[in-house]
Amino acid sequence: MAIYSVLEPPVRDEASLAGAVVIKDGFSVLAFIAPLIWFLWYRMRLEALGVLVISAVLGSVSMIPGLEAVPLLGVLVSLFMGMEARNLRANALRRHGWVDWGVVVAASQEEA
């Protein structure tokens, strides 16, 4: 069983439950491997820009002699994105007016 957050669209009518977004709580492997692509796939431009800036800064700093351990920070950033990407997606939807419907425990996303 997994935990899912359910968010309703900003416009509430009879079909709002059909347009609800179900987000599974937990680690996202794709966001760990390619966080920029994951954020752009879900149209999270602000978060994608943040990942791009952080990656550029870490890449620039790693060119400085004596700071060879900086690329390991990139792995930590990817690990953080894998753990928090789904929460960031829910927060991005809330910023756009989506409303929390509730939390559901289900075996699959379709069941939720």
Image: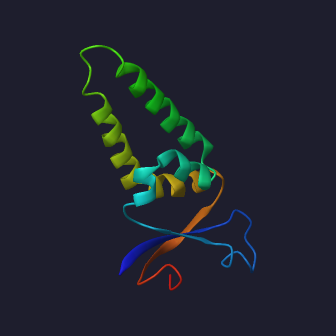
> Percent x, y for residue 62?
34, 22
Is the residue 84 above or below the residue 49 in the image? Answer: below
Is the residue 29 above or below the residue 56 in the image? Answer: below
Q: Nearer the viewer, residue 109 or 94?
A: 109
Q: Is residue 64 left or right of residue 14?
A: left
Q: Residue at x 64, y 51 (%)?
A: 43
Q: Nearer the viewer, residue 100 or 41?
A: 41
Q: How many marks?
A: 0
Q: Is residue 23 left or right of residue 60?
A: right
Q: Residue at x 40, y 52 (%)?
A: 32
> Percent x, y for residue 7?
58, 67
Q: Is residue 39 left or right of residue 80?
A: right
Q: Quadrant of residue 46?
A: top right
Q: Residue at x 35, y 81 (%)?
A: 1
> Percent x, y for residue 22?
54, 71
> Is residue 91 visible to the viewer in this orientation of the structure?
no
Is the residue 17 above or below the residue 72 in the image? Answer: below
Q: Residue at x 41, y 84 (%)?
A: 107
Is the residue 12 above or below the residue 67 in the image? Answer: below
> Percent x, y for residue 55?
45, 32
Q: Nearer the viewer, residue 61 or 26?
A: 61
Work out which residue is located at the far top of the displayed protein and give it: 65
Colour scheme shown: rainbow
> Is residue 57 visible to the viewer in this orientation of the structure?
yes
